[in-house]
Amino acid sequence: DDESLDPPKRPRLVEPEAESAESAADNESEESEEAPSDVEGALMSLRPSRPPLVVLRHLIYSVLTDRTKVDRDVEALARNGKLRLVQLPSGGDDVGVFLAEDWRREVDLRCDADVAAAFLDLSARRADLYVEARDVTGVEALCAAGLLRPRRDVPGDYFWFACPNLGGFASRLHHGRDVLRRSLR
């Protein structure tokens, strides 16, 4: 019996349901504007219990079924200032997702008040993962604080938004992936 050998599948937080247009409209009117979105709920369930409170963007796909909707929602929440996307220093294209209040707390904890305030003001105006140097004052101080990382994949003075002390997280991520690869060989 091959079915008994398959590992059990992890349940998804949100199951796709066929709703009529009428019931969908009723549900929307009942929900307040402050209710968390599916993506925010997924982040809350995936979020680690200790800092850094970052979730890899691709992990959200394992919880929610519609990848396109996840991408749209993440981008919209980032534009609205509810999420902060950062490029992880893992050497790949890993994107970390923070709830905005968690990210602000990390920045406030690790930087002096002037640098943190200037940076939070800059990042609140940008939903992108990167910024051009001419748009930033005090690039050196922000790099020294770990809030910006130079982009090496494009010519020019571009910087990734970052979070201080994510290097340890990225190295543990890389190590875990290496262990998994070796065990699968």
Image (cartoon, rainbow, N blue to C red):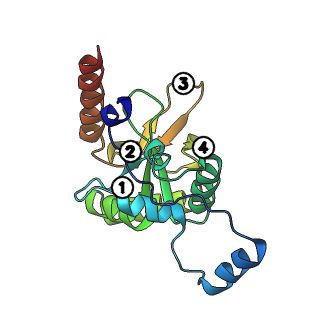
Identify residue for label 4: 134
Identify residue for label 2: 9
- Disc on res. 153: 3
User: What amino acid is at disc 1?
Assistant: Leu
Q: Label 4: how many residues lie within 10 Å, few (<14), some (14-19) or many (20+)?
A: few
Q: Considering only order in the chain, which callout, 1 or 4, is on the residue closer to the N terminus?
A: 1
Q: Residue at x 25, y 55 (%)?
A: 51
Above or below — where is 52 with respect to 89?
A: below
Q: Considering only order in the chain, which callout, 3 or 2, is on the residue closer to the N terminus?
A: 2
Q: Are marks 1 and 2 in contact (CB under 8 Å)?
A: no
The CA span between labels 1 and 3 is 30 Å
Above or below — where is 38 with respect to 71?
A: below
The total of numbered circles placed on residues is: 4
Above or below — where is 96 with respect to 25?
A: above
Q: Which quadrant holds the C terminus?
A: top left
Q: Residue furthest right?
A: 21
Under circle 3, the secondary element is: loop
The CA span between labels 2 and 3 is 38 Å
Q: Nearer the viewer, mark 2 or mark 3?
A: 2
Q: Considering only order in the chain, which callout, 4 or 3, is on the residue closer to the N terminus?
A: 4
Q: Position of residue 107 (x, y in %)?
A: 34, 59
Under circle 1, the secondary element is: helix
Please state which of residues 22 and 158 is positioned toward the viewer in this rendering: 22
Above or below — where is 131 with respect to 6?
A: below
User: What amino acid is at disc 4?
Assistant: Arg
Q: Position of residue 37 (x, y in %)?
A: 54, 68
User: What amino acid is at disc 2?
Assistant: Lys
Identify residue for label 1: 46
